[in-house]
Image: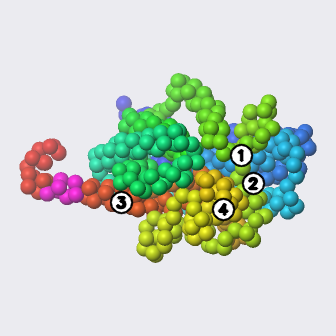
Amino acid sequence: MSPGRAGARTAVGGPRHRRPYLTLPGGSVPGLGLVGALCNLAVVALALFTQASPSWTLILLLWLNAVLFAAARLVERTILAAFLMSFFVLLLGREITIDFFRYETSQAPPGQTEHLQLCLALSLLGIVAGASAVSALQARRRRPHMPSEETGHGYAAAARPGGTVLADPSIVRCLFWVTLALSLISVALRARYVLANGYLSYYTDFSDLEDASGSLYGLRRIEIMLPLMLTIYLGLFPPRRQVTAAATGWAAYLVLSLLTGQRGTFVGGVVIILAYWIVRSRQDPPGAWRIGTTGRIVGAIAVPLMAAVLAAVESARGVGAVASDTDGRNPILQLLYGQGVSSTVVRNAYAYADFIPRDWYMGEFLHSGLLARLLGYQVYHGNTVEHALHGGSFTHAFAYTLLGPQYLSGRGTGSSFIAELFYDYGYAGVLVGGAVYGALCVWACHLVKGRPLSNGLRLMIVPVVLWAPRGSATGFLSTWLTPSVVVALAAVSILSLAAALLREADSARHPHTHRVRST
């Protein structure tokens, strides 16, 4: 075969170069424009048919087009798409069921609905703006390194040679499995206690029991390390077989955590694996991460099953915000109504703003972890008056303001990153905070071969980010600053560096042996 014919075959029908992560053809998914137009028309038709208000229709359209924006480049915006789904379920679902389907007839006090609508619109605009800015920045950085037919190299196409010096694969793999085993023991003990004593006991009695028991306290500190150990391990880009084994162990942990009533941990943990799988399917050779027919069937069954399980957990906890007159209602609308309680948090935070203890709630991360210890702040745990008044936590301060004695029994209202941003900085804060979260979602999905520690820190905050519509605005910062996380990073780095030095010393003592092995 002539060189010309060989070259032509390589370029057209021969082996294909690996496409580097985040290199997407042309811009958007084929056919997405048509699908988007049809979806927009469907929403408008539904609004006209149900006589929905123009304001809620516009907000729903804004959310829909934000999802289409994420879907256009799903590889680099997987976590953004998941965040928008969480945004809909936790913040929009209840309002849509009420306005579009007349699920509830009670009227909100004057001003609350307008406030909520403005907050949601500003937040969505900020999310898209922040995600667009980071996507554009990443595209500009990639451009000089785009793959070419001559070299086949591109951004993140090859591992950086020094990337695993501080994250040795063998050591990371060993630490992950040890951490997982101890975490399974920890979460199993906690699940048994909660099942025996009730969901609220997790926030009252068990907290004191854990602090008093050295073994429980130690296991819990190790359990906090698990998400980082998993994501560092995944950040090494191991073979699919090893990823499947790690994901199976992680799934067992998530199921046990669900028995404690912690739905955010479960959903966020599932999204970590899904996002990672999508990234690897793009980065690795075509077909290496293909999901077969059986996997697709299992996935199709798992989605509604997961929704039903999450709703069952909400009901079993006995503290859910499900309407009392929902018997016989559409189960999908019932689910959306029950889970969308965070919109009520945004409403009530606006109505009771003058009664909530004054504090800088964006600085909650200063009241826990390493910074609290460095600054000399008292670290509070559980539902106590001290935590509500002096802990810098909007979640606890708001719940104490609304519930009073019921808060001390373990009950809570939850929070929302939108409510916290508005309380501290008004509507401008909601817009800017939305941009930060949009940027964070795209940044967290940007994995690079040869940077396992960086990849791990990005992926580990995914559960906290996805829970932000019902959680703290700066929870991801608190996660990074947890002492257990710092200890885990130090352990991986020190042990990996020691292993590298030992190998180098051994190579220096036995150069002939290593030369023969390399040959």
Q: Is residue 53 magenta?
A: no
Q: How many marks?
A: 4
Which residue is the site of mark 3?
A: 487
Mark 2 / mark 1, whichever is N-terminal: 1
Residue 336 or residue 196, whichever sits in front? 196
Give how far apart the Cα atoms at labels 1 and 3 are.
Answer: 38 Å
Viewer-nearest of labels 1 and 3?
Answer: 1
Tell me residue 204's x, y (percent). 54, 53
Residue 350 appears left or right of 242: right
What range is drawn magenta here? 498-505
Q: Quadrant of residue 71?
A: top right
Label 3, label 2: how many angstroms apart (C-alpha)?
38 Å
Residue 344: which disc? 2
Query: SS at mark 3?
Result: helix
Looking at the image, which residue sits at the far bottom?
375
**Which label sits on residue 400?**
4
Q: Indicate how the structure is coloured in the image.
A: rainbow
Three-letter code for the amino acid on which mark 2 is drawn: Thr
- For the residue pair 188 and 303, the one nearer the viewer reads as 188
Which amino acid type is marked by label 1?
Ala
Q: Is residue 189 visible?
A: yes
Q: Which residue is mark 1?
A: 321
* Secondary element at image label 1: loop
Question: Helix, strand, or loop for circle 2?
Answer: helix
Of residues 305 and 184, the one nearer the viewer is 184
Q: Can the viewer see residue 147?
A: no
Residue 84 position within the rendered picture, expressed as x and y whole percent measured from the top left:
66, 49
Determine contact: label 1, label 4, CB under 8 Å: no
